[in-house]
Image: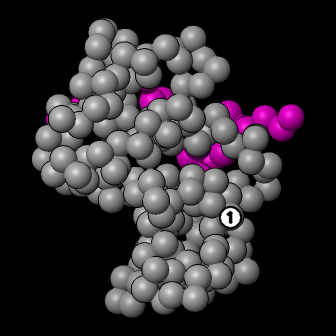
Amino acid sequence: MRVFPEKYEELDIDKYDKQLMATVKKIYRDDELATFMLCCNPSKTSFGAATNRLPEILEFSPEGLSFAEIGYQLVKSPNDSAGTKYGENHAKLAEMLDLVKIHNRPSKVKSTKLGKYLLGFKPEEKVELLKRLLLRQFLIKKLIHDAGEGNVEYISEVRLLSKSTAARRGRNVRMLLDYILEGTDDEARIQRIDWDVK
C-alpha cells in the first residue's frame, strides 16, 4: 500500500495531520454547523461519490462543471431539478474536505490541488487522510470527544435545526462517524450517542 508523504510542500498536507480528536477548544459557530449540515443530506449524498467519483469527473473538465452537469454525470438523472440538487450536495461535501472549490456567478465546481493530487491513490489508500479531513468539522470532533466522556444526546448538539431536519441529517452524521471510528479502539463511542430526535 502506498504511504502519503510526511510533507508535501505545495499542498501542505502536514496541516491535516495535526487534528486532535480530543481537543475541542474552538468557539461554537452557528454558521459552521449550518454549512456542515447542508452537506449531510442522507437521501442525496454518497460519501464515496463525493470523495472519489467527483474528483475523477472534474479531471476531464478543467474549466469546471455546474451542479446540474455533476448531477447528470453521477446519476444520469432525467430530472434537471433533482440532478442539480444531487450535484450541489456532492460538491458541497467535497468542498468541505478541500477536494473541490465552488466558484459562484455562475456556480462552477473545480478541482483543488489536493483533489487532483489524491487522484493518484486508490480509495482504500485515502481513508486515513479523509478521516483527518472530516475531523476538522467541529460537530464531528465534539460528538466524538464528548462520547469519550460519557453519554451524549445528538439533538442537543444541533439545537438550531428543526427536529425534522435534525433527524434526516443525523443519519448521515452517524455514517460519517462510523467511517471515522469503525475498526478503531474508539468505535464504542458511537454507541454512547443517543440519535433519537424527540
Quadrant into which the C terminus falls = top left
Q: Nearer the viewer, residue 98 or 46?
A: 46
Residue lying at 50% horizontally and 74% vertically, measured from the top left:
87
Q: Which secondary structure, mark 1?
A: helix
Left or right for 53, reference 88: right
Q: Which residues are magenta?
A: 1-28
47 up-or-down from 132: above or below: below
Left or right for 38, reference 119: left
Q: Let me know if residue 101 appears in the view.
A: no
The percent coordinates of residue 149 (x first, y second) are 31, 9
The percent coordinates of residue 174 (x first, y second) are 44, 36
**Which amino acid type corresponds to the residue marked 1 in the rendered image?**
Arg
36 up-or-down from 128: above or below: below
Q: Quadrant of residue 77?
A: bottom right
The percent coordinates of residue 196 (x first, y second) are 28, 32
Residue lying at 46% horizontally and 59% vertically, measured from the top left:
43
Q: Which residue is mark 1?
A: 53
Q: Residue furthest front?
A: 198
Left or right for 42, reference 54: left
